[in-house]
Image: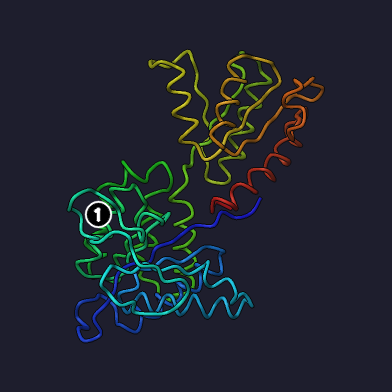
Amino acid sequence: MPRKNLNILVAGGFDPKDQGALDKPVADFIAFGQSLGVEIIQQGHNLITGCQTELDSIVAAAAQQQLKQMNKPDTEKQRIVSYVMQGQAPCHQVGTIIQSDVPDWDIGGLQLTPPEVVGNADVVLLLGGFYGTFRAANWARLTRKPLLPFASFGGTAKEVYKVESARFDKVYAGKIEKLEYDSVLKSLSNDWAVLATKAISLAEKVITSRSVFVIMSFAASPQYKDLYASIQRVCGAFDYNAERVDESNLFKRIIPEITRQVRQSAFVIADVTEPKANVFYELGFADGIGKEMILTAKKGTDLPFDINDVPVLFWESFADFETELKKRVEQIGKWQGRA
């Protein structure tokens, strides 16, 4: 399974004439911006910029140089994309430069249309910044894009961090731990390459739920208890929480709750040992919305014709099963930044 390619917006900026506006020296700010540009490309992702600040130029140039070092300069137009506000000259000429269709990036006007620079991003990284950085943060919140504001460098991003920190339990807790969030965004490390690697890893995680939805029979059988325990152990090793809806302790309508949890899950594990209607209903729904799925079944199970061409992980010895399941979950984990 290929790694998921993200569109990562790096926004913010600095005033070279005002050294006191940041909490770190400008040289450190520049070095980290360059490391972000390198790491975004090195990890297979795409860079988006607003093409209006010195930071935009620095990150784009570093990304361009990394593509050259990887002997992939021909992909620059696809991997580095910048949007320019109408009436404004671009601050760099790296990659693809596109004039925005949105006449004003401020929040307001005739209708609430997010600028492409945020609308086409999967995650927004903020570093330093001015008034426009608040604008980017607000658009990200309105469009429900994860925000990673680097508080340790100061500037506007530090103020944005305070708001995101207060929203953490509501917005991010199902995806990452607060300690991991803070250890990157408030890091005191001066190893910019390592910090950039951690930042991109955090970006990968913060867009994906840690929840794994488990579809299986509700039968009170020891083998199913052991199966469920094995699934939870393997998923837990990759920072996923494997859970199933138990009809006996659910105080809501079960179908809407099932569809909600499937939608919010990182992926689905479905055991098809028993041809239960609920199992195939949930499996069909997950497949219909494009969820990654791992199918399991007890060894010797006669699979229905409509799934007998789907790869199934058969279990008998749970020690062997966990070894094989780990390989499958690790593949998805790499794609989602958890392996």
Going by the picture, which residue comes out furthest to the left? Answer: 109
Q: Position of residue 331 (x, y in %)?
A: 65, 48
Toward the right, the furthest residue is 300
Assign a secondary structure to mark 1: helix
Q: Position of residue 118 (x, y in %)?
A: 35, 57
* Residue 299 locus on image (x, y percent): 79, 25
Q: Is residue 4 above or below residue 308?
A: below
Residue underneath mark 1: 138
Q: How is the image coloured?
A: rainbow
Identify the residue at horizontal 47%, vertical 63% (top origin).
Answer: 198
Which x, y percent locates residue 90? 34, 77
Image: 307 above or below 193 = above
Picture layout, residue 61 above or below residue 284: below
Above-or-below relation of 244 to 172: above
- Determine which quarter of the picture holds residue 22: bottom left
In this view, the residue in front, 183 or 38, is 38
Q: Residue furthest bottom?
A: 17
Dot 1 alpha-carbon crowd within 10 angstroms: few under 14, some 14 to 19, many 20 or more:
some
Identified by mark 1, the residue type is Asn
Near-viewer residue (101 or 72): 101
Look at 54% across and 54% down and name the residue there. 337
Is 152 displayed left or right of 70 in the figure? left
Q: How many marks?
A: 1
Residue at the location (47% across, 13% down)?
248
Q: Is residue 43 left or right of residue 297?
A: left
